[in-house]
Image (cartoon, grey):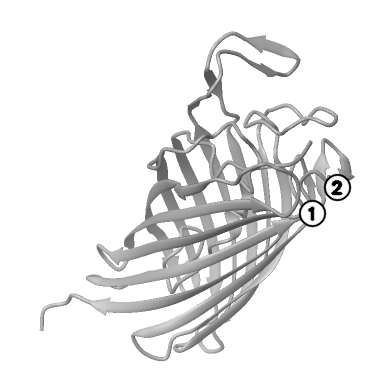
Amino acid sequence: MKRLFTALVLMCLFSGLRAQMPHDILYMSKNQACFALMYGHSSWNHYWENTLKRENFNIGTHTTQNVMFMGAYGITSRLNVIVSLPYVWTKTNAGNLLGQKGIQDGAVWLKYKAVSVGGFGLHGVIGGSIPVGNYVPDFLPMSIGIKCRTLSGRVIAGYKHKASGLYLSAHGTYTWRGKMNADRDAYLSNDRIYNTNQVSIPNAYDAGVRLGILKKKWQTEVWAERSSCVTGDNIRRNDMPFPTNNMQATVVGWYGKFQPKALGVNARVGYVTDGLNVGQSTGYMVGVLYLMNFKKK
């Protein structure tokens, strides 16, 4: 009947402040902080029901919007902590399904530069998220989240040419996801009925590459990402999606930032080129950044 938790808000709707995302190779200096307030928008009217690409006139166009606060702080020049908290709301322009709105999941990451030789760097990131808002997770695609705890480990390799600012990076991530409390006494997954409201959510992985230029006042890059669940089932014909579905997506996009001094702006766009059990969404993000120093004089 429809499709997805824009779960992939696309893992992707949010990217980059200056050293402030858990997938980039930039860092805050010691005692330096960057705060951001960002607005994201993602919509789709076609989706993949298993491998079948289709549309649904009972939904029309599905839209997910969010406002996210993010912050990054330099514990040292090689170790940063990053936090985020989004407020999300969903809607459709057809049918009678009511959208949800509310605070979603809070997340925190630690990013560490393990190796730095010339322009080459090797980085490790560990992080996790916990549900904060009181939302209904098993009413996809109107749900604002899946409402389970997560733990992620990521490795990033990157190279930056000092003179030109040209950089290339690649990352790989594995995410462990806990169980979700469904608003039902039993659920169907992989053609089996489970007589419990404790739903096991599939673990997931993602990988991506970024090519860009970073200068003192501005940054621009193009990127591609692939995300997938490790296991999971498919949306049954003409049925609703469920959090146990194996959601996969390939996304390409662009990111840019302009920050001449403490105040700056950034923007990002992304498009799903291929997928499984997900919507073919187009998303964008715009944000305002503010840089602060807490160093003693």
Q: Residue furthest top?
A: 195
Q: Secondary structure at mark 2?
A: loop
First in residue order: circle 2 vs circle 1: 1
x, y percentage for residue 164? Answer: 56, 88
Q: Which residue appears at 69% of the width and 68% of the height? A: 253
Quickly name the residue at label 2: 55
Name the side, left or right, on which 66 lies relative to 239.
left
Few, some or many residues within 10 Å of mark 2 (<14, 14–19, 20+): some
Q: Residue furthest front?
A: 96
Q: Which residue appears at 44% of the width and 35% of the height? A: 149
Q: Are marks 2 and 1 in contact (CB under 8 Å)?
A: yes
Quadrant in the rendering for residue 113: bottom left
Q: Quadrant of the C terminus?
A: bottom left
Which residue is more in the foreground, 69 or 34?
69
Name the side, left or right, on which 12 lies relative to 282.
left
- Under mark 1, the amino acid is Asn
x, y percentage for residue 45? Answer: 79, 54
Quickly name the residue at label 1: 45
Q: Residue furthest left?
A: 297
Q: Which residue appears at 41% of the width and 69% of the height? A: 37
Which residue is more in the foreground, 13 or 109?
13
Quadrant in the rendering for residue 161: bottom right
Name the side, left or right, on which 78 lies relative to 45.
left
- Under mark 2, the amino acid is Glu
**Alpha-carbon span between mark 2 and mark 1:** 6 Å
Few, some or many residues within 10 Å of mark 1 (<14, 14–19, 20+): many
82 vs 237: above or below: below
Q: Quadrant of the N terminus?
A: top right
The answer to whether residue 137 is seen in the rendering is yes
Q: Secondary structure at mark 1?
A: loop
